Amino acid sequence: MIGVRCRQPAFSWHVGRAAMNEANFKMSVLLVFSVLRLIVAVPLFMTARRTRLNNLYWLSANFLCLVIAVPFAAAGTANVPWIFWTFISLTEITLIMFVHTTFYQGRRSPMPVFMAIAVIGMIGGIYGNIVNDFVFSAWSVYPIAALVWAWNFVEAYGAYSRVSVDTSTEDWVKSRYTLMVSYSVLDFVSAVLGTATTTNLWNSSLSAVIVLAINLISVFVQILTWVMPERFRRWLNRNQAAHMEKQMVEQVSAIMGTFGVAMTTDTGLTRIACLYALRTTLSAVLGTEDSNQIERHILTMTFADWDTALQRPELRQALTKSGADEHTVEKAVKNAHRALLEKQSLITLSSQ
């Protein structure tokens, strides 16, 4: 009996130490998450201050609320429910304001409805703390987080759909919207699973590990989104030069095509002959036959530049060499001037 009684305290001591080590480990993980989100919050605040963008102030506040809330979660050694649930509710409110000020500038939005729901949820979370009902607080707060993240996803995806087809938008900007969509999905799933685990709908070690993994991936995606390292931004933009070159070729083709169509109307001239005459004229203006320089110059030409170019003798000489008589040449040049007047917004768009 003595031996048993001696071994029992030792067993209890080891169990208690193991439990303490586990709690300390969980607390360390929570603190790591707070630090990672602080890495996002501070640069966002500085950017908002520099650019005076109110939406970034709200997003920075969202991350700061998480920085405060997470260490006081039930999984850690601090475990202060009223701080945790209150600041989780504040993350919902700040996220609602971020979505409203980012995607609804100058337009009506469902923000008042979402805000009313979030405030009701915050009151429910506070009531749950007062009556010491953790599950009631969880049901009051977590489902609203899922709802708000779903709204963020819908708006971010809509914005991505619009910019993805805009050739003037750089690739890294399009990628930022893709990253926003990605972490919105992750945080929506995290909120759903968080609801399930905190309300005991799915209470297992596996659920806790999944939620932890999703949150870890999400916070790194958020860092890449809002504190985008320059090397990562350059990698996202690796194909931008080719896109810009293609866009330049398309713009030049549209401008020259406008003149080509006009100059061949009722003149009997071929489009190839007209375009060759225009390029020959611009080559004389620049003093070079380099196609790239000529195309880049075309994109910078103003109305006055084109008006001057169309009056140069090189244009008439080139058209005459193609076999056109004087009357045809004059009509083609007159047509080109008319096209310049009628479609100057298209022809001189790049230089404005």
Image (cartoon, rainbow, N blue to C red):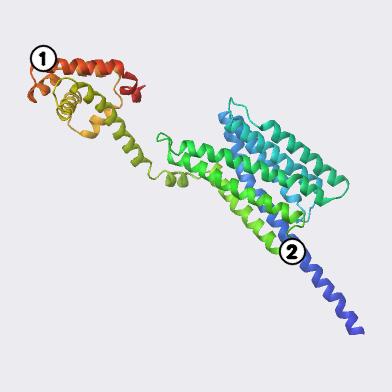
Viewer-proximal residue among 37 and 179 = 179
Query: In what element is the residue under mark 2?
Result: helix
Is 301 displayed left or right of 45 in the figure? left
Which numbered disc, 1 or 2, marks the residue closer to the eye? 1
Q: Quadrant of the N terminus?
A: bottom right
Count neighbours of disc 1 (C-alpha within 10 A) and say few if under 14, some if 14 to 19, many if 20 or more: few
Is 274 displayed left or right of 187 in the figure? left
> Can you say whether 57 is above or below 132 in the image?
above
Query: In what element is the residue under mark 1?
Result: helix
The type of residue carrying mark 1 is His
- According to the picture, the residue beneath numbered tag 1 turns out to be 327
Which numbered tag is attached to residue 22? 2
Q: Quadrant of the C terminus?
A: top left
Viewer-proximal residue among 283 and 10 = 283
Which numbered tag is attached to residue 5? none
Mark earlier in primary sequence (1, 2): 2
**Quadrant in the rendering for residue 298:** top left
Determine the residue positioned at 68% across, 63% down.
206
In percent of width and height, residue 272 lies at 16, 30
In percent of width and height, residue 141 lies at 75, 45
- Residue 80: tell me if it is visible: no
Is 22 displayed left or right of 244 in the figure? right
The type of residue carrying mark 2 is Glu
Viewer-proximal residue among 29 and 110 = 110
In percent of width and height, residue 88 lies at 73, 44
